[in-house]
């Protein structure tokens, strides 16, 4: 989107582009230099960063709304986008120590930039935990059950719509 990559799509849990498969196939076969012949790695890194930053922006917007009114939908908006961090962390834990190429945006960004994948995952988990505690501390006790139910329902709707 930002870098002129064709066929861009911003999904709930990732950003994609039409040359994504050829780029990563070339990367897995012969490395970054070969993949660079398909698409400039900096363009891919910017796209991946956009996919990772968008949930943080959504969380901040949700937190601002919750600060004004702790409506259950606002709570869901503030918490759900970062749930993907937990799923990525579970995926990494399940494949740790194996010679597996993970397909998360965090793993891809780490491969291109050299930023440790663990750092990106810890950042996401920290944001998730902090947003959950901050948001639910502002929801009145009598509304917490509804807020939790709407958050879970919103998450499931996002998964189904994918």
Image (spheres, helix red, strand yellow):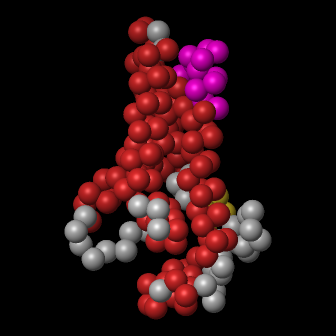
For the N terminus, which image quadrant?
bottom right
Residue at 41% from the left image edge and 61% from the top image edge: 116
Q: Is residue 41 visible?
A: yes
Is 29 left, or right, of 96 in this rendering? Answer: right
Q: Is residue 22 visible?
A: no
Is 18 left, or right, of 70 in this rendering? Answer: right
Q: Nearer the viewer, residue 75 or 122?
A: 122
Please, is residue 103 above or below residue 147 in the view? below
Residue at 53% from the left image edge and 46% from the top image edge: 158
Measured as percent of width and height from the top left, residue 108 is found at 48, 68
Measured as percent of width and height from the top left, residue 137 is found at 44, 16
Specify the farthest residue to the front.
114
Measured as percent of width and height from the top left, residue 45 is found at 60, 67
Q: Nearer the viewer, residue 18 or 143?
A: 18
Is 2 left, or right, of 29 in this rendering? Answer: right
Specify the farthest residue to the left.
97
The answer to which quarter of the image holds residue 47 is bottom right
Q: Is residue 95 magenta?
A: no
Please, is residue 145 above or below residue 102 in the view? above
Please, is residue 62 above or below residue 56 in the view? above
Report the magenta stretch's main SS. Answer: helix
Q: Is residue 72 magenta?
A: yes
Q: How many marks?
A: 0
Please, is residue 143 above or below residue 98 in the view? above
Q: Nearer the viewer, residue 43 or 5?
A: 43
Residue at 62% from the left image edge and 48% from the top image edge: 54
Q: Which residues are magenta?
A: 61-74
Residue at 41% from the left image edge and 24% from the top image edge: 133
For the C terminus, which image quadrant?
bottom right
The answer to which quarter of the image holds residue 94 is bottom left
The answer to which quarter of the image holds residue 57 is top right
């Amino acid at each position: 989107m930002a870098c002129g990559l064709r066929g861009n799509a911003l999904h709930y849990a990732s950003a994609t582009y039409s040359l994504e498969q050829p780029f990563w196939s070339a990367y897995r076969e012969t490395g970054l230099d070969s993949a660079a012949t398909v698409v400039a790695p900096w363009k891919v890194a910017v796209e991946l960063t956009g996919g990772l930053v968008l949930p943080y922006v959504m969380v901040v917007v949700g937190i601002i709304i919750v600060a004004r009114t702790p409506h259950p939908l606002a709570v869901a908006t503030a918490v759900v986008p970062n749930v993907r961090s937990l799923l990525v962390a579970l995926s990494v834990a399940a494949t740790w120590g194996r010679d597996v190429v993970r397909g998360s945006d965090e793993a891809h960004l780490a491969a291109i930039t050299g930023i440790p994948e663990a750092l990106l995952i810890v950042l996401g988990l920290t944001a998730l935990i902090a947003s959950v505690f901050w948001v639910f501390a502002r929801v009145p006790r009598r509304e917490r059950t509804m807020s939790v139910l709407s958050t879970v329902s919103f998450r499931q709707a996002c998964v189904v719509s994918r």
